[in-house]
Image (cartoon, helix red, strand yellow):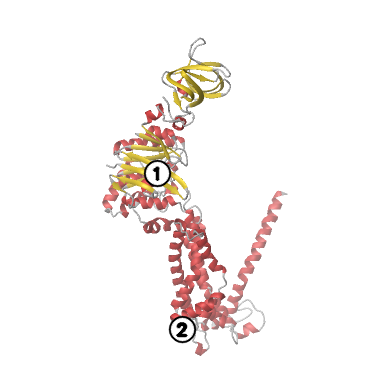
Amino acid sequence: MAEVKIEGVQKKFGSVLALDAINLTIHNNEFVVLVGPSGSGKSTLLRIIAGLERETSGTVTINGESMAEVAPKHRDVAMVFQSHALYPHMNVYDNLAFNQRIRGVARKQVDDKVREVAERLEITDLLKRRPRQMSGGQRQRVAIGRALVRDPQIFLFDEPLSNLDAELRVRLRTEIKRLHRELQRTSIYVTHDQVEAMTLADRVVVLRDGQIEQIDEPDALYQRPANTFVAGFIGSPAMNLIAAEAEKNLLRVGSQILPIEFDHNGAVTLGIRPEDFLLEGPDAAGTIDAQVTLIEPMGADTLIFCVIDGEHEVSIRLPRHIRVRDGENLKLKPRQNSLHLFDPESGHRLN
Amino acid sequence: MRGARVNLYSGLKYGALIIWAVFVVAPFLWALSTSFKSDNGVTGGATYIPFLEYEPTLDGWAALFRDTSSGGISMQGPYLASLIVSLVSSGIALALGTLAAYGLSRFTFRAGPLSNSDITFFFISQRIMPPAILAIPYFLLLQFTGLLDTHIGLILVYVAMLLPIVVWVMVDFFNTVPTELDEAAMIDGCNPIQAFYRIILPNCGPGLVVAGLLCIIFSWSEFFFALTLSFAKVQMLPPTIVILNSNKVPWWSLSASALASVVPLVIVAFFLERYLSRGNLAGTIRE
């Protein structure tokens, strides 16, 4: 049971503003992912919640209790670090047991807890090993175990999977999600990987330059990004962002014209996700012409790079059974209701 | 052709090493040989091999344990004094120095334009200064506090001398330990002191060994303060040996006492060498 409330939190390192007036409420048992490019302040925010960093101004409350004067060890949070941060001079058993021992828990109870967690994470046969005798994946598993033994109110993850290879990353990601579903604990997870953010989160918080760009559920974030930054950051390959001119219900892209269901006049940034293009026959209406410049088969689908009017680069994702040739001219039609329109100045969403 | 080149190279290499080894070991062998000689054996021309060239005697060694009144030099007192002073001062310097070094490694201190690295350099700069500058102030200070010619007085001076070494070595070591370990410990339930003793210090064993070794070497062989700040009640080993040089030099006892004074360092080096050569210095933390 834990609700974390962050109100007006600002953090300065010297004269550098790392976080600027952050307001965020994390509900009980919610899995919230903080995502953003490096330097966005996401790790700083997590460390402030952990108590490892002190906010310059603003308040952090957990269950209505101000954390201003509360040391990390009294916050009832457990943290998994990017570098695993296992104690090198202890074996796995002692690493898992350390936090219980230092809190004076009875030996028998500690032993039960450690063995239970080891079993859950399938690391029982590693209990006697030292951290340096294990692989990266095993270490990170133990680091997660160390947090689990605590049975804390809040789990904090600071890019826990970034140092692992791709296959392991996917495996542990699934495991973290399963653990959260079983344990039902408030979890805050920092990553720069938007796939991790989308797959794990109940809600995603997108940060840039110390400010929150958008807070939303993964689906909503994907379907209605609030601005061009979020649009470009979430989704892979990234959403195509094309400079265009709106005139009533028409959109001018270079020399070509697309009908839109939105009344607007003036310059806009048009956003279309690569999978939202449909390939049309030669005499279809409401299409734009694009020339294929590069084809990347990806298995399930094919990624095709094109240029519109020789200047606007777009990427298109088509099912693998649709074959195109290099240099071919395609007639593309955006899927209905799939156009995102942004203000070219502020980047804010218009439609 | 290539093989010959390699042979020449390693021949030269080992030749140089043998010359160096002889250069280092020869004085000790000479002292060893001399320590078993009698008066005549020393003054009667250069001889090296016992039983063949001269008749060995234990007189030189026996004199170490005899009172001065019966012609001996009574080494036990100075030996014990040196042992006490160097061990205690090394211990205190390690205890205080690691704390100071941890502070300098983990927390930011500011005094106007000065910050951590300046403080660290300030520590090291103590060692740049020749000790002669400090002899008179130390003398007056100890005299004023009544600590002149006492173990405690010398220990205090030695701690001041050793602290910079410990701080200097340990700051570097603590800097190689990732701060995530401190943070993990603090989230796990430690206060900063517990994080230091239970997590960080145990991972700096090699650093402690190096710092401790330097402390013992420096304090054991320290001569200048031992000579100026102690004289009657407390006599330290290095001055005692050197003073043997005064009127008629008893070369045999001088050799014996010099060899005896090296023994503790040889023992320490013997054990620590194993520890250090296990590769413990590298890769303790970084994996």
Q: Give the amino acid at mark 1.
A: Leu
Cα–Cα span, label 2 and label 1: 63 Å
Residue at 29% x, 41% y: name it: A3
* Mark closer to the observer (2, 1): 1
Task: Measuring from the top left, give residue A256's x and y in whole percent.
Answer: 53, 17
Residue at 49% x, 31% y: name it: A345
Do the numbered discs 2 and 1 sit on residues whose CB atoms are within 8 Å? no
Disc marking residue B233: 2
Q: Residue furthest bottom?
A: B69
Q: Give the amino acid at mark 2.
A: Lys
Say which chain tag 2 marks.
B
Element marked by disc 2: loop
**Camera-side residue: B35 or B150?**
B150
**Camera-side residue: A330 or B214?**
A330
Label 1 environment density (alpha carbons within 10 Å; few <14, some 14–19, many ≥20): many
**Where is A259 relative to B38, above or below?**
above
Q: Are marks 2 and 1 on the same chain?
A: no
**Camera-side residue: A17 or B198?**
A17
Say which chain tag 1 marks.
A
Task: Measuring from the top left, give residue B139's x and y in whole percent.
Answer: 50, 80
Q: Which residue is mark 1?
A: A45
Query: Seen in the image, is A3 located left or right of residue A315?
Result: left
Element marked by disc 1: helix
Residue at 64% x, 62% y: name it: B17
**Camera-side residue: B29 or B241?**
B241
Residue A142 visible at all: no
Quarter of the figure with residue A264: top left
Residue at 62% x, 81% y: name it: B54
